[in-house]
Image: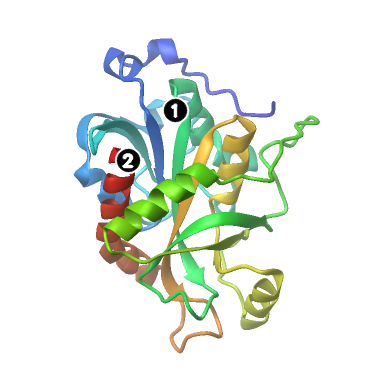
Amino acid sequence: MSGMALTLSVEVLPKAVRDFQPEWGIVLGSGLGSLVEEVDAILSLPYEEITGMPVSTAPGHAGRFVFGRLAGCRVMMAQGRVHLYEGRTADEVTAAVRFMENIGVRRLLLTNAAGTLNPKFEPGSWMMLNDHLNLTGTSPLLGAPNFADMSAVYSPELRVRFATAAGEEGLVLHEGVYAGLLGPQYETPAEVRMLRMLGADAVGMSTVLEAIQARALKMEIAAFSCLTNWAAGLGTKPLSHEEVIETGRVASAQMLRILTRGLAG
């Protein structure tokens, strides 16, 4: 299977990491890094210390792995990701997922900040992905006939689990289709109309390649979009990354409640 070989092997990691055996991996998107503060952390590992691991240049992406406990579960958090729009390849974009799987992660939670395309899904709320559209024009599986079934990328069991958790917390958790685009420019109103016709409920610049890689590695996946703004043509304000970061920061508290109850369940 295609995949950038990280030259740092598991054996040379700190003993605390090797012995940790994380039950869950969590990738934190733009503005959601504050969730790390809720983890009873034992160790952080900067991406720079892992030979071959790309480091993000996007604001709001710290670039480190954090190991600790959340809701009594052993978790490994990737605080920040790299994107195609930074000039990275699909292989580089998904390096963190392969590293987490190599450490032993079998259940992966992906989060992102996204624009909402669905008039019923207001900014500031969360959407759990039930499917996606990969419109990036690439795949992390390029390089060989790495055929992988994508009929159920996002685990039905995990979706039930976190939908139940949201309900028990009295929080709204939408479900819908995420469209992953290349970026870094935001979509035009015409592109937004196209995406809505294709069946997308939210749009962003990440997640789909990570999900493809994780599914090919037989990981169990759930993914969540923080709906930070109306997509172009649906709102009245110009789009800005600062708004994305701020809305994500405020909405993090809701996701923490959903994650905490869902992980504990």
In the image, residue 115 sits, relative to residue 177, either above or below, namely below
Looking at numbered disc 2 in the image, what kind of residue is underneath it? Leu
Q: Residue at x 37, y 53 (%)?
A: 164
Position of the C terminus by quadrant = top left
Left or right side of 94 for 51 = left
The residue that label 2 is drawn on is: 263
Position of the N terminus by quadrant = top right
Where's residue 199, x and y in %? 66, 69
Q: Residue at x 46, y 82 (%)?
A: 238
Compare marks 1 and 2 and give the one earlier in the sequence. Answer: 1
Residue in the foreground of this view, choosing between 213 and 59: 213
Element carrying mark 1: loop
Left or right side of 39 for 218 = right
Q: Determine the residue located farthest toward the top in the rendered image.
A: 11
Coloring applied to the structure: rainbow
Residue in the foreground of this view, choosing between 243 and 105: 105
Where's residue 174, x and y in %? 45, 65
Label 1 to label 2: alpha-carbon separation = 14 Å
Asked whether residue 56 appears in the rendered view, the answer is: no
Front: mark 1 or 2: 2
Left or right side of 37 for 90 = right
Asked whether residue 4 appears in the rendered view, the answer is: yes
Neighbor class of circle 2 (other Cα within 10 Å; few <14, some 14-19, many 20+) is many
In the image, residue 246 sits, relative to residue 234, either above or below, namely above
Q: Are marks 1 and 2 in contact (CB under 8 Å)?
A: no
Looking at numbered disc 1 in the image, what kind of residue is underneath it? Val
In the image, residue 11 sits, relative to residue 257, either above or below, namely above
Q: Determine the residue located farthest toward the right in the rendered image.
A: 145
Q: Quadrant of residue 142?
A: top right
The residue that label 1 is drawn on is: 105
